Amino acid sequence: MKKKARPDLSAACAGIKSPNPFWLASSPPSNSAAQVMRAFEYGWGGVVWKTLGQDPPVVNVTSRYGACDFGGRKVAGFNNIELISDRPLAVNLKEILAVKKRFPDRAVVASLMVPCERKAWHDIVKKVLDAGCDGIELNFGCPHGMTERGMGAAVGQVPQYVKMVTEFVKEKSSVPVLVKLTPNVADIRPPARAAKAGGADGVSLINTINSLMGVDVETLTPKFAVAGKAAHGGYCGPAVKPIALHMVAAIANDPQTRSLPISGIGGISNWSDAVEFMLLGASNVQLCTAVMHHGFRIIEDLNAGLEGWMRRKGFMTLGRFVGRSAPDIVEWKDLDLRHKTVASIDKNKCIGCDVCYAACNDAAHQCIAIDRKGGNRKPHVIESDCVGCNLCSLVCPVDNCIAMKEVPGKEH
């Protein structure tokens, strides 16, 4: 029997090739050659080196990480106030050269952040090119610490600066240039358009979101404080995924940036998360928080899961499905007002917990009732009153107990 061909996981984002679409994002896991080489040994396709700046290196603080847990899930949201690399630039450059020499087939991208001066950018671009990097990522997204120095999100929030600095880099770069965008804007499209106007070969998004992790109500001290004081940091992890997907789709669907390659970032924890980003337009994806939580070995599940899904769907290359779902993201005015669904409760699965009843009656449209005669505790839907809001199905603790069934719509 002839063996079936395996799906090809190789990716190309803005001309930067890698054996699979999974890169380490610029972050603590990509801080040194020892880490990156270990990641590549496990099977990661590429890395964006932890952001490099000028010497002398920055000085970081402790503590620098915070997290929020939800529903028993650890690190549902993750916050950091860590700055760019605090290691000497020469050391990083030497290690990039060593990594690329040992792993010539992997993508090694240098993340950069220096002041908005043409010479500063020209100087550091030459240095990373001499180190053999395959691409450059401009960090216009970091929302803390570096913004106070006129870098990071302080650049990314001003389209004119995005265009200007991108032009500085493109004047000297012989490798593809990605612009990493900040989500701390009202509309992600203007900075993406500015990056394209400046000559960017692609964009990566999202960087982290401005956040504070809370206050200890017993001590009245900010959580994860530094000597009792806290500064806003960058929020990431699974909790930010919907925001990231929205912004990726916005760029993929914008007529002015539709052709711009995208490297997707934000809350990716497993292979299906990655597929969602790619269906909405990302050519590849970058991970950070999931690696900080579970380690480099998650790449084994990422590769296996993606390959298995592609095989089931009949996709032999990534290009067959990248962007496939993006056209289905439309403006509200383009939604079908005649489409109607109502809730349907499976009485065999219902445990009589009353959660859907309370949610519907107190917070939705009062279309779930319970006939309590004879000790009955199981609810039923008053279909004529149901507006199809989905709330009951979302709060139900039993999988597939409440489904939204489509019914003939009405003309408006």
Image (tube, grey):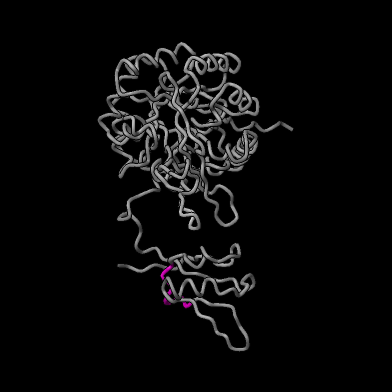
Instruction: Name the residue at 53% across, 31% down.
Output: 28
The quadrant of the rendering that contains the C terminus is bottom left
Q: Residue furthest top?
A: 130
Please report the bounds of the magenta region as a residue range: 382-388
Q: Is 380 or 287 nearer to us in this picture?
A: 287
Q: Is residue 276 visible?
A: no
Where residue 124 appears, as percent x and y from the top left, is 39, 16
Residue 116 colored in magenta in the image: no
- Magenta stretch: helix, strand or loop mostly: loop
Instruction: Name the residue at 42% across, 38% down.
Output: 206
Instruction: Name the residue at 54% across, 71% down.
Output: 355
Where residue 131 appears, as percent x and y from the top left, is 49, 13
Q: Is residue 84 visible?
A: yes
Residue 386 colored in magenta in the image: yes
Instruction: Name the residue at 38% across, 16% down.
Output: 173
Quarter of the image holding residue 234?
top left
Quarter of the image holding residue 54?
top left
